């Protein structure tokens, strides 16, 4: 069998002219000799908020911290308050809930969208439910309208986990401005990635944003006087300066990602793709598909030099980390089924048409008899 060139799962390399722009931003921070909470962070927060169409963005150290701080800042959630989280997401969605002193309650995902299922969400509601975290998984907007219908009459805090969905939109509005607050991650592999860790909270609520600003600096009331033993979580000036450069390219990079995902959808035969809510534009973060004999397909692709990953191999209702926190293990059969079949195909902004072709050809050849 003809051996193709290997295809990496992703490459974070950028064209030379963008590297030069980034180098300029790094030099600017270096020469300013100001490295934490300064003008670059302020400027990035303004620019990112304007991009999302929200009033405020607050830079923090990671997406996980953004979820934790958004929960802590969103009002008085009692210790042990229940927060509904989809069973299929990054484990960090639920880790952030535990760190905020709350209890994650896992609800199943929808079998066709693979995001939080409105009926399962309604069934998971209890008198102790204080918040819900819909996740825009793989860059696909969660089914917001149906979730809001299911939650009507409950006075819930809505934190969007938009860590995979920078620039996605629903009914003409960018995700990140749909709920009480939203969390973004700038981990290097995300659609808007820093040269290290970073995150942000987005919100239209000015007082919630002010509380996040206060909390991210360790709940410091005045210099070296703290109201509570809060950790700090800040976005570096260096990362903010780099993110400002990359934000200007985000829409065109997302379009390239969407084009690749749409090609996979059109040309790949033996895989199932998630349904995208009507009227939404995905951020195409990951090209996740389902295949009935996933492990054999993955092994075959690996043998052909094509690298894949699984997002995620274990649903959260089975995760040892949360066994103590979620008293009854809920049944989430859709998440179980999907996790056993998931495969993320190679996807990066600058994945060449030849590499895309290699992936399509190999999946169609190996998927048929895998
Ligand atoms: C990446 C990610 C997180 C965590 O973000 P970090 O910046 O790595 O802390 C949380 N939720 C989802 C869905 C993610 O993809």
Image (cartoon, rainbow, N blue to C red):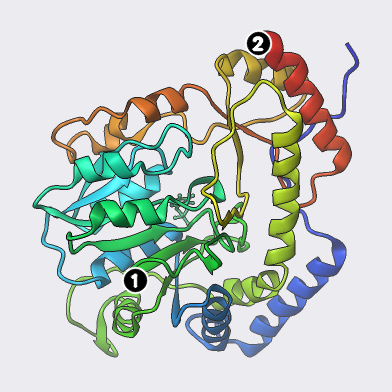
Q: Residues within 10 Å of mark 1 (few under 14, many from 20)?
A: some
Q: Secondary structure at mark 2?
A: loop
Is 301 situated above or below 247?
above
115 left or right of 155 in image: right
Is 263 situated above or below 27?
above
**Nearer to us in this view, 29 or 119:** 119
7 left or right of 119 in image: right
Q: Residue at x 46, y 29 (%)?
A: 313
Is 318 situated above or below 367?
below
Q: For residue 76, what is the image quadrant?
A: bottom left
Q: Of tags 1 and 2, which is closer to the observer? A: 2
Which numbered tag is attached to residue 370? 2
Is 270 situated above or below 183?
above
Q: Residue at x 69, y 30 (%)?
A: 307
306 left or right of 121 in image: right
Q: For residue 96, what is the image quadrant?
A: bottom left
Residue identified by numbered label 1: 232
Residue 333: horizontal and vertical position, in percent? Answer: 33, 25
Residue 39: horizontal and vertical position, in percent? Answer: 55, 89
Which image quadrant: the C terminus?
Answer: top right
Q: Secondary structure at mark 1?
A: loop
Q: Residue furthest right?
A: 2
Residue 164: horizontal and vertical position, in percent? Answer: 53, 53
């Amino acid at each position: 069998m003809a051996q193709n060139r290997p295809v990496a799962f992703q490459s974070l390399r950028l064209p030379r002219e963008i590297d030069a722009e980034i180098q300029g931003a790094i030099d600017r921070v270096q020469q300013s000799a100001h490295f934490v909470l300064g003008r670059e962070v302020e400027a990035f927060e303004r620019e990112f908020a304007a991009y999302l169409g929200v009033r405020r963005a607050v830079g923090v150290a990671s997406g996980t911290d953004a979820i934790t701080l958004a929960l802590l800042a969103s009002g008085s959630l009692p210790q042990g308050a229940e927060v509904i989280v989809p069973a299929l997401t990054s484990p960090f969605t639920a880790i952030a809930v535990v760190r905020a002193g709350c209890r994650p309650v896992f609800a199943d995902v929808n079998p066709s969208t693979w995001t939080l299922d409105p009926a399962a969400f309604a069934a998971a509601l209890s008198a102790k439910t204080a918040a819900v975290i819909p996740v825009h998984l793989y860059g696909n907007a969660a089914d917001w309208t149906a979730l809001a219908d299911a939650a009507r009459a409950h006075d819930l805090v809505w934190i969007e986990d938009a860590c995979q969905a920078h620039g996605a939109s629903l009914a003409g509005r960018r995700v990140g401005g749909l709920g009480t607050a939203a969390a973004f991650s700038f981990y290097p592999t995300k659609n808007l990635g820093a040269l290290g860790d970073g995150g942000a909270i987005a919100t239209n609520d000015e007082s919630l944003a002010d509380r996040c600003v206060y909390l991210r600096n360790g709940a410091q009331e005045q210099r070296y006087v703290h109201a509570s033993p809060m950790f700090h979580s800040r976005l570096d000036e260096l990362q903010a300066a780099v993110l400002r450069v990359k934000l200007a390219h985000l829409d065109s990079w997302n379009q390239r990602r969407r084009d690749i995902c749409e090609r996979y959808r059109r040309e790949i035969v033996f895989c199932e793709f998630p349904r995208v809510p009507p009227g939404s534009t995905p951020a195409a973060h990951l090209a996740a598909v389902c295949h009935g004999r996933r492990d054999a397909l993955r092994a075959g692709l690996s043998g052909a030099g094509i690298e894949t990953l699984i997002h995620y191999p274990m649903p959260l209702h089975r995760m040892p980390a949360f066994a103590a926190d979620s008293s009854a293990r809920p049944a989430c059969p859709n998440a179980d089924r999907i996790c056993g079949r998931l495969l993320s195909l190679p996807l990066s902004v600058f994945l060449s048409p030849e590499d895309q072709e290699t992936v399509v050809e190999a999946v169609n050849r190996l998927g048929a008899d895998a």
